[in-house]
């Protein structure tokens, strides 16, 4: 079963009353691999959302990000402040699988508007704080003679510098 059909079937099985759903992530891009899973954003009318679930549907591992319209907005707002919003990008770039009442089209348009605006401006204080953290880690790396500690510090440097460069 192809990814789109499998995603629709997984939603039908787990959330037959869903308002809308998106298939996002690497499976809908040229970055798809044999290990790609189905990242599905599901919009419900109410509870049990919000929650995240990992399930298996046939041969596909599935990650479901289940929200109401209100919780989608709240999660995206929080993620955008952190300058990393996978949820936002899944709805901006993903495939709208179905939309029973227009909320999917609305969320997709809102997601595209927010991604086009880009991440929020970084304050001078935040830049200074991040610069300090990175230079502190570089000093620790230069002074460490323990291989395990050096590996940990290098990993932390990669994580912190990639945070600065990522908007997805």
Image (cartoon, rainbow, N blue to C red):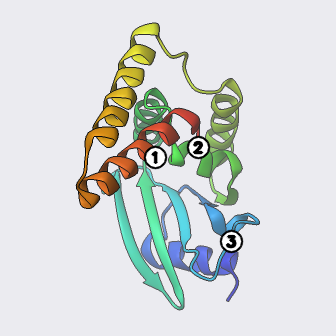
Q: Which residue is mark 3?
A: 32
Which residue in the rendered view is the most extreme toward the right?
30
Q: Residues within 10 Å of mark 3 (few under 14, many from 20)?
A: few
Residue lying furthest top in this view?
Answer: 124
- SS type, badge 2: loop
Residue 93 in the image: above or below residue 23:
above
**Location of residue 17 with respect to 58 vertically, above or below:** above
> Residue at coordinates 41% horizontally, 42% vertically from top-left?
157
- Find residue 119 and report its image quarter: top right
Asked whether the residues under the numbered discs 2 and 3 touch, taking CB atoms below 8 Å apart as contact, a structural biologist would say no
**Among the two numbered marks 1 and 3 on one chain, the one whose residue lies closer to the N terminus:** 3
Residue in the picture at 44% in, 36% down: 79
Q: Earlier in the sequence, mark 2 or mark 3?
A: 3
Mark 2 crowd level (few <14, some 14–19, many ≥20, 10 Å Cα) = some
Which labelled disc corresponds to residue 40?
Answer: none
Left or right: where 35 falls relative to 66: right
Q: Is residue 43 above or below residue 128?
A: below
Camera-nearest label, 1 or 2: 1
Q: Is residue 36 left or right of residue 129?
A: right
Image location (x, y in percent) of residue 145: 25, 51
Q: Identify the image quadrant of the C terminus.
A: top right
Where residue 167 appears, as percent x and y from the top left, is: 58, 37
Q: Label 1 vs label 2: CA separation?
A: 16 Å
Q: Which mark is residue 158?
A: 1
**Does 19 sit above or below residue 60?**
above
Q: In whole angstroms, how far apart are the C-alphas of marks 1 and 3?
A: 24 Å
Give the residue pinned by disc 2: 168
Nearest to N terminus: mark 1 or mark 2: 1
């Amino acid at each position: 079963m192809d990814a789109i059909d499998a995603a629709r079937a997984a939603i039908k099985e787990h959330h037959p009353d869903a308002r809308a759903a998106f298939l996002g992530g690497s499976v809908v891009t040229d970055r798809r691999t044999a290990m790609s899973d189905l990242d599905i954003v599901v919009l419900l009318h109410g509870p049990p959302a919000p929650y995240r679930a990992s399930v298996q549907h046939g041969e596909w591992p599935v990650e479901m990000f289940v929200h109401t319209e209100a919780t989608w907005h709240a999660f995206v707002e929080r993620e955008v402040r952190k300058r990393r919003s996978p949820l936002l990008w899944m709805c901006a770039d993903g495939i709208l699988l179905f939309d029973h009442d227009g909320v999917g089209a609305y969320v997709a348009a809102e997601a595209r508007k927010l991604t086009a605006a880009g991440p929020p401006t970084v304050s001078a204080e935040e830049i200074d704080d991040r610069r300090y953290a990175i230079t502190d880690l570089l000093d620790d790396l230069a002074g460490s003679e323990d291989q395990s500690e050096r590996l940990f510090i290098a990993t932390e440097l990669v994580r912190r510098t990639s945070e600065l460069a990522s908007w997805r």
